[in-house]
Amino acid sequence: MQEEQGMKVLLVGSGGREHAMAAALSKSPNLDQLLIAPGNAGTSEIGENVPVAIGDVPGLVALARERSVDLVVVGPEAPLADGLADELNRAGIPVFGPSAAAARIESSKSWAKRLMARHGIPTAGFATFQSIQESMSHIDTLSEGPVVVKADGLAAGKGVIIAQSRQEASDAVAEMIRGQIFGDAGSTVVIEECMEGPEVSVFAFVDGRTVSNEVAACDYKRAYDDDDGPNTGGMGAYTPPEFWTPKLAARIRAEVLEPIAVAMDEEGSPFTGILYAGLMLTESGPRVIEFNCRFGDPEAQVVLSRLETDLLDIALAAANGTLEQVDVQWNDQAGVCIVMASGGYPGSYETGKPISGLSDVSTSAMVFHAGTGQGDDGTVLTTGGRVLDVVASGSDIFEARTNAYAAAQSISFDGAEYRSDIASRAVESPAP
Ligand code: AMP
Ligand code: GLY
């Protein structure tokens, strides 16, 4: 174990994921002070919110310096892609999160796909283009059927179009390259083979070639029940998936997690932080949909409740390159997260609605704040699309789900919306 008495930590981010990370960090006996930039109404109860935006890399580095923090933990991908970890390293401040070069695993889909291809990591067949003409010629060579078209850059999880025909694919490519839908993120497009099967998000702490024990969760990207409606940042999650087995976990470790860590290290962009593999379990085995360079939101809210090991110890070890000395353990508890959103999300919605019932939530559930702020009189108000994440644990998914929905029902705000089918498929087909 390392000497880390009385550590001062800066956590970057403001969503439900960061509230859950703040809660996990605050359990550490080694934590002295937690700063969150910029945080939300929930994190203000755990630490000190400091109003520096996640997009303000120089401001975050200056804050870490001025407040002499011992470790910076980064929640979201955008500041990582912008080089926050590089700047902190340059300033001699330990950071848990990848360099901009390693964050390309998420910030450049074409870079990630080529890396996977070079190292034989299973993923959908693909080609990348910057010209509409060349994309069209490529699409003409594909057989009829669904085609996946993606913007190369960061598009907040929304840069993917599953085109049902070649014509639809051609239209999507043209709009992306002209910058009409995803701006600069779409100036390079990735055209992919469409895979089929259940999806799973797998997370591991990584430092160079060391890959910790992994944990799996399922999330719900569509806005409405039965996976209807537009894609969102995520409307709920549960862990463990009903189809998750030690055999599947071992296969994913051997075919995906370990090879990608080696590949990144070998190619000069070693990864430090949380690696998130979005996978599809196809008939020919697990294949990568995408990698992300951070925790999933809302998956973090359920998997962190299963983390038995001190998160601060893990983050500090990864930042210092000594993760191999930490035995990361996840327990067998089930967890369910229900996202309460503002009416109209992911389209337009109103904010500033007072939230009631927060103090009535029973101890069998936790509420993480995502889009909240404090009014002048201290009332908690809605400030975003995804407002609250209601999370419950249990010895099985049924218990966790029951507790999570009971808690969600005791909270209200004008226009609140949430899906009623989170984890229902896992309750219907219990774990093997
Ligand atoms: P991504 O932003 O890459 O996670 O993609 C968003 C969603 O699009 C995924 O969760 C999948 O449901 C779907 N998707 C992405 N790529 C593919 C693919 N090659 N085949 C089938 N579905 C895909
Ligand atoms: N839950 C999906 C994501 O964090 O990208």
Image (spheres, grey):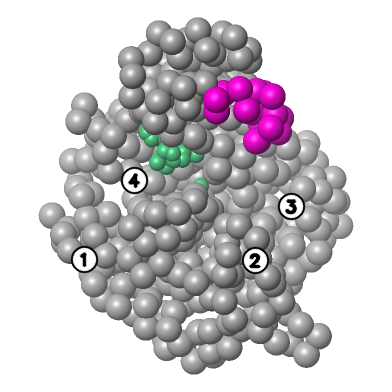
Position above or below: 209 against 231 = above
The residue that disc 2 covers is: 349
For the residue pair 9 and 216, the one nearer the viewer reads as 216
Position above or below: 146 against 41 = above
Disc 4 and disc 1: Cα gap in Å? 16 Å
Question: For this view, does 295 lie left or right of residue 193?
Answer: right
Give whichever of discs 4 and 3 has the lower sequence position: 3
Q: Secondary structure at mark 2?
A: loop
Badge 3 density bin: few <14, some 14–19, many ≥20, Cα 10 Å: many
Q: Can see residue 32?
A: no
Residue drawn at x 22%, y 40% as measured from the top left: 248
Residue drawn at x 33%, y 15% as measured from the top left: 143
Q: Secondary structure at mark 1?
A: helix
Q: Amino acid at mark 4?
A: Val
Q: Amino acid at mark 2?
A: Tyr
Residue drawn at x 40%, y 25% as measured from the top left: 165
Q: Quadrant of the C terminus?
A: bottom left
Mark nearest the camera among 3 and 2 is: 2
The residue that disc 1 covers is: 427
Disc 4 and disc 3: Cα gap in Å? 28 Å
Mark nearest the camera among 4 and 2 is: 2
Q: Can you tell which mark lies on residue 259? A: none
Q: Residue 52: x, y in percent? A: 81, 58
The residue that disc 4 covers is: 200
Q: Can see residue 130?
A: yes
For the residue pair 102 and 318, the one nearer the viewer reads as 102
Quadrant of the rendered image holding ligand 1: top left
Disc 3 and disc 2: Cα gap in Å? 23 Å
Residue drawn at x 74%, y 69% as measured from the top left: 49
Disc 4 and disc 2: Cα gap in Å? 30 Å
Badge 4 density bin: few <14, some 14–19, many ≥20, Cα 10 Å: many
Question: For this view, does 327 lie left or right of residue 90?
Answer: left
